[in-house]
């Protein structure tokens, strides 16, 4: 079951140029079996997601991308929106309290461009990031970062024993489905999604 678990729409993400309807059409065009909307610091209501799902005949799940003092963290299973800037540790405590999952989004975005590659950050240096001890996994396939940054994230996830997560981070229709997770089991709700992610019952694919 192929899902794109990291997308932003104009509904609640000012940085996106993709309406929810455009997102759904793109998801279907790209052969996705469902999508999970992860607006910045906002979660869709279950009713909103269900209405969109019914309109287009495709499952819609809900998560969030939360801005923390230690970078952007994707969460699933958490309904509480941040009223202020949280630390990764506080976010992790909230996620654990509800049995959710937390993933560091694009953990090395911008690290290896504009000459920063000359700093030659290696996996050992990268592992020092304190945020990585407050998440279950790292996003290692994100369409908005360079291949080198995705590769570093993958190597660090392996070295740290963290889950390897994929999401397009689409802010426009053309990006939907570029990084997908193919789940081994049927995902019918966010609880299924959280369990399947925590159990690593998926493979990740870069589609284009
Ligand atoms: Zn954004
Ligand atoms: Zn994002």
Image (tube, rainbow, N blue to C red):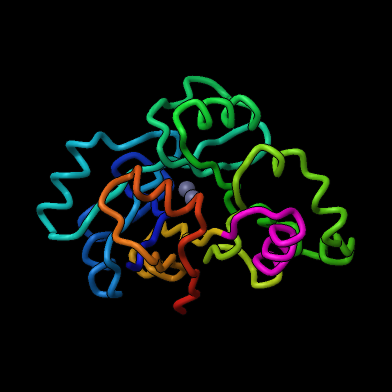
Q: Is the stretch drawn in magenta largely helix, strand or loop?
A: helix
Magenta stretch contains residue 158? yes
Q: Quadrant of residue 26?
A: bottom left
**Where is residue 55 drawn, in percent x and y?**
10, 54
Residue 158 located left or right of residue 77: right
Residue 81 located left or right of residue 1: right
**Residue for point 37% across, 70% down:** 174
**Where is residue 53 drawn, in percent x and y?**
17, 52
Give the farthest residue toward the left. Answer: 55
Q: Quadrant of residue 148?
A: bottom right
**Residue for point 60% across, 45% down:** 136
Q: Which of 186 and 124 is in front in this view?
A: 186
Residue 183 located left or right of residue 127: left
Position above or below: 149 against 74: below
**Residue for point 23% across, 60% down:** 24
Stretch in magenta? 149-164
Give the farthest residue toward the bottom. Answer: 208
**Where is residue 165 drawn, in percent x and y?**
54, 58
**Where is residue 91 drawn, in percent x and y?**
57, 29
Magenta stretch contains residue 137? no
**Residue for point 30% across, 69% down:** 32
């Amino acid at each position: 079951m192929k899902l794109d678990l990291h997308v932003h729409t104009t509904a609640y993400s000012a940085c996106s140029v993709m309406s929810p309807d455009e997102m759904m059409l793109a998801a279907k065009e790209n052969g996705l079996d469902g999508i999970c909307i992860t607006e910045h610091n906002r979660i869709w209501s279950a009713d909103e997601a269900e209405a969109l799902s019914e309109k287009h005949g495709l499952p819609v799940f809900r998560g969030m991308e939360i801005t923390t003092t230690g970078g952007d963290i994707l969460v699933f299973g958490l309904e509480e929106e941040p009223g202020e800037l949280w630390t990764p540790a506080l976010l992790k405590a909230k996620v654990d309290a509800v049995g959710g999952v937390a993933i560091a989004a694009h953990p090395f975005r911008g690290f290896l461009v504009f000459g920063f590659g000359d700093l030659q950050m290696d996996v050992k240096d990268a592992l020092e990031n304190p945020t990585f001890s407050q998440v279950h996994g790292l996003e290692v396939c994100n369409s908005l970062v360079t291949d080198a940054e995705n590769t570093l994230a993958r190597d660090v996830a392996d070295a740290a024993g963290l889950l390897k997560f994929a999401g397009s981070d689409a802010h426009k229709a053309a990006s939907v489905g570029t990084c997908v997770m193919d789940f081994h089991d049927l995902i019918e709700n966010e609880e299924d999604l959280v369990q399947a992610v925590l159990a690593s019952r998926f493979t990740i694919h870069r589609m284009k």
